[in-house]
Image (tube, rainbow, N blue to C red):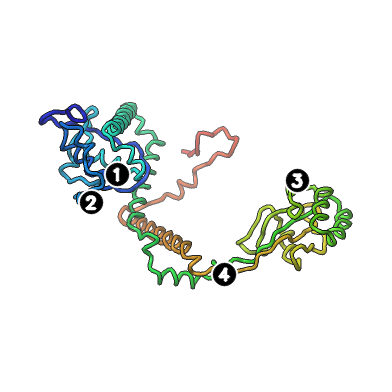
Amino acid sequence: MGPFGARGGTEPRVVVSMPPMSGASRVTRTAVPLLLAWLAGACNEKAIDKAPAGDSSAAAPAASGLSPELAQKPIATVGDKVITLGEFAATIDRMDQFERLRYQSVERRRQLLDEIIKAELLAIEAKKRGLDQKPETRERIRQILREDVMRQAKRETTAPSDIPESEVREYYEKNRASFRDPERRRVAHVVVADEAKAKQLLEQAKKASPTEWGKLVRDHSLDKSSGSASGPVELAGDLGIVGPPGAEKGDNPRVPEALRAAVFKVGAVGGVFDEVVKDEGKFHIVRMTGKTDARDRTLAEAERTIRVALLQERLKNAEDTLEKELRAKYPVKVDDKALEKVQVPMPGDKADAGPAVPK
């Protein structure tokens, strides 16, 4: 008796509307003998369990390790629809290598087939109810098709490791500024609401040791989130690390630009900016608590980043080229005047159902 109760010349038949599976890798050579044994040994389930795992001599004649003839073999039916062995193998094929390990036994493959059949049953019923014609359903289908086309284009693009060393080096030389890490400084502050008080505290802060600085923060600062009573005194009033003003690298949303500019005018670690800094109606005493000098990353340090950037560039070029070819193949026309008539409802409007298009 075979996996589906077939005996003799009766072939089990299968229908497949594949549920989404993770991964896009190919069926390994281990899975190929299992699938072949399943079909060839229909009267002997043990044939699958005894199939040689990882037989390197098993050459894959076609996608999913099946010949075109085997791929067309039916293994189940759902209504009038047929699921083939190739479709079932393709479902496993789309899984990652670890997920495929779950389907080494006949029983687990039966469970997978049952999941596929359930999906097909629901798909048939959905079509009967006309759900496949709903705009949102058709939009999902378009998105799936788009993703599949782009996934195929990505598979045809060189892997990061295959990009020539000369191209990596050329990119590095042309973009050296991108691999220059600017100087970074760590900022701490005391913030108060009164300018006169801030000026008084500034004089104390200029002479303060780390312990005395911590006491100033905890006794006077309005920003209690920047230094707890139990935290290290050297981190009292800490706002984090920033790069030089205007530098894209090293931005820190916790540090206002006025404080960022001030800390880069401090002469040494532990020093305090010699003026009170006003920002959004409050007054800050700014201290530099740490410093990291600027440095250039070496080619070896930047190589992985460069390879990823080059690959992304190639993928973008491939996508642009494909779009250009498709626009030439399928002419596109846009009615700008009609587009201008679309009225997008604002939040709170009654037209929450979507854009209104006047007749």
Residue at label 4?
296
**Other residues around mark 2 within 10 Å, as few (<14) / some (14–19) / many (≥20):** few
Image location of residue 208, percent across then percent down: 83, 59
> Within the image, what quadrant is residue 244 found in?
bottom right
Within the image, what quadrant is residue 273 found in?
bottom right
Q: Are marks 2 and 1 in contact (CB under 8 Å)?
A: no
Classify mark 3: helix, strand or loop.
loop
Q: Residue beneath label 2, please?
A: 56
x and y, in percent, of residue 102 in the image: 33, 37
Label located before the other in sequence (2 or 4): 2
Residue type at numbered disc 4: Asp
The residue mark sitting in front, 2 or 1, is: 2
Query: How crowded is the residue under tag 3: few (<14 C-alpha within 10 Å), some, or many (20+)?
Result: few
Up the image or down, 92 lies above or below 249; here it is: above
Q: In this view, does 290 lie to the left or right of 137?
A: right
Residue receiving disc 3: 230
Residue 123 visible at all: no
Q: Residue sitting at 64 percent across and 58 percent down?
A: 251
Q: Which amino acid does label 1 sit on?
A: Asp
Q: In this view, does 283 lie to the left or right of 15?
A: right
Q: What residue type is labelled 2?
A: Ser
The image quarter in which residue 120 lies: top left
Task: Between residue 25 and residue 41, name the one nearer to us.
Answer: 41
Q: Distance between the residues labelled 1 and 3?
A: 56 Å
Label 2, label 4: how far apart the Cα atoms are: 47 Å
Query: How dense is the environment of label 4, judged by Cα within 10 Å: few (below 14), some, or many (20 and up)?
Result: some
- Helix, strand or loop at disc 1? helix
State how far apart marks 2 and 3 are (Cα): 63 Å
